[in-house]
Image (cartoon, rainbow, N blue to C red):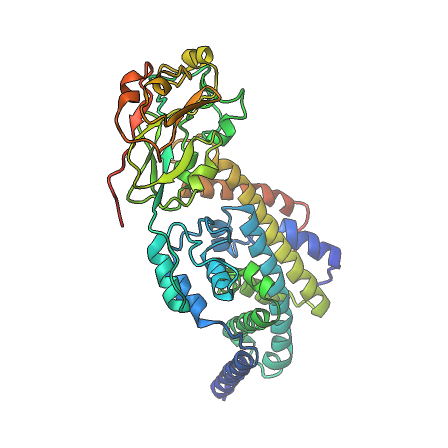
Amino acid sequence: MDLNLGAIIFVAILANNIVLNQFLGVCPYLGVTKRIETSLGMGMAVIFVMTIAAVVTWFIFKFILVSLELEYMRTIAFILVISSLVQLVEIFLKKTNPTLFRALGIYLPLITTNCAILGVAILNVQMDHNIIQTIVYAIAAAIGFTIALVIMAGIRERLELVNMSSFLRGAAVTLVTAGIMSLSFMGFAGIMSL
Amino acid sequence: MDLITALVVIGGMGLIFGGMLAVFASKFAVEEDARVETICDLLPGANCGACGFPGCVAFAEQVVAGSASVDACIPGGKGTCDNICEVLGVESVASEQRKIAEVYCIGSFDVAPNKFDYQGVQECKAAVLMGGGFKACQYGCLGLGDCARACPFDGVTMGKNGLPIIDLERCTACGSCVKACPRDIIRVVNADRIGKAVLCNSKDRGKATRQACEIGCTGCKACVKVCPQEAIVIEDNLAYIDSSKCDDCGECVEACPRDIIKDVSKVPVRS
């Protein structure tokens, strides 16, 4: 697959948005989008972890799994790698940068089991990206994730103030919003897709 | 053979990562004062911010570090202060005085009319932005419940008459509702006070108040004249009763032509 980096960025952020078109990482998308600040925090944490995780899993895949012909073990291997990695990052940050650690707060451990991270790691090896493409794809996908979260949080903050029927309040209107957002992002898919 | 390689590789990776985590955890161990966590557990955990720090954890850290006062937690009151002092091994300085919030407006829907129909965002903060609020009285309670939403202890509910009701059992005087009210109607008062109070916030002149509310204080001085303790003063067309001077005789209640002076004696609730 011959892809230039610009196309990867466009596709990962908009056309094939990880949340809105691939439905990965939907739980933080619904769970931490009550306020723009928290969704931004979550987005930053995901950008950070997704990039590191994609690089490390790429190396593990290329140099351990492929050479031992164990490609079919990648899901379980990646889960192992990602969860230990997040733990490592957490311990490291707690010591070296307590401010960032507190800012990321609960989101860092939440990411450990986030399917978006695992999804991107697997997509990277599936699409046979090289290391540069892997890094770019991971960052772009994470930015796409952040954008989806922040837009959702912005809409939900405004919805809080709307005088609407009680049967719509809460989860119902959130899911309707999610659907409409997904629908509008599908429009980008017509322009370009992987 | 495949099975064995798979087992070895995945198992090996697990072992390596586990080992790395163990090494990392000991190398980068952060020494936390155990007292922070102990104090954190003693705090109410509402993160109301009444102590002046962002959340209970921050307060616990500061109090252990010595930069916060041991009695700064208002919701926790004397009990929490005593507990903190015990953990820190210092003499308790808590005062027995418990405080609660009180609403200084009784202009419900039926006595304080609206000047226009408001269909906007159902929050007091938003409503005051539109023409100074939809109530004819520009000092009265709008009744959209910002205070009820702000209370971290679920101690404020909105009554059917459009006025907030403060649950004396639950109120901790943290001041969240005081901050939330755009009209500054809620004040924090001593919980055990005995006496009367003018439950009005209107600083308008008599005529304007009369037009805006059937019961608002007009500053007529009738209560000032009858008070034997000279506990009442008029400021900005509004009567104030000094609760330290008030002896609960009730002369002012009789004298008030607007029936806005009410008994606010509190039965002692919660020690």
Whole-percent x, y for residue A103 in the image: 57, 59
Considering depth in this image, is B239 or A9 the residue closer to the camera? B239
Q: Which residue is drawn at 36% across and 14% down?
A: B214
Q: Which residue is drawn at 52% across and 36% down?
A: A158
Whole-percent x, y for residue B71 in the image: 42, 55
Considering only vertical position in the picture, is B211 above or below B126? Answer: above
> Quadrant of the rendered structure where residue B210 is?
top left
Residue B208 appears in view: yes
Q: In this view, does B160 lie to the left or right of B143?
A: left
Whole-percent x, y for residue B98 in the image: 34, 46
Q: In which quadrant is the C terminus of chain A drawn?
A: bottom right
Task: Check the image and name the residue furthest to the left.
Answer: B267
Whole-percent x, y for residue B54 in the image: 51, 53
Considering only vertical position in the picture, is A6 above or below B157? Answer: below
Q: In which quadrant is the N terminus of chain A drawn?
A: bottom right
Q: Which residue is drawn at 34% across and 47% down?
A: B97
Considering depth in this image, is B219 or A59 the residue closer to the camera? B219
Residue A18 appears in view: no
Considering only vertical position in the picture, is A25 above or below B127? Answer: below
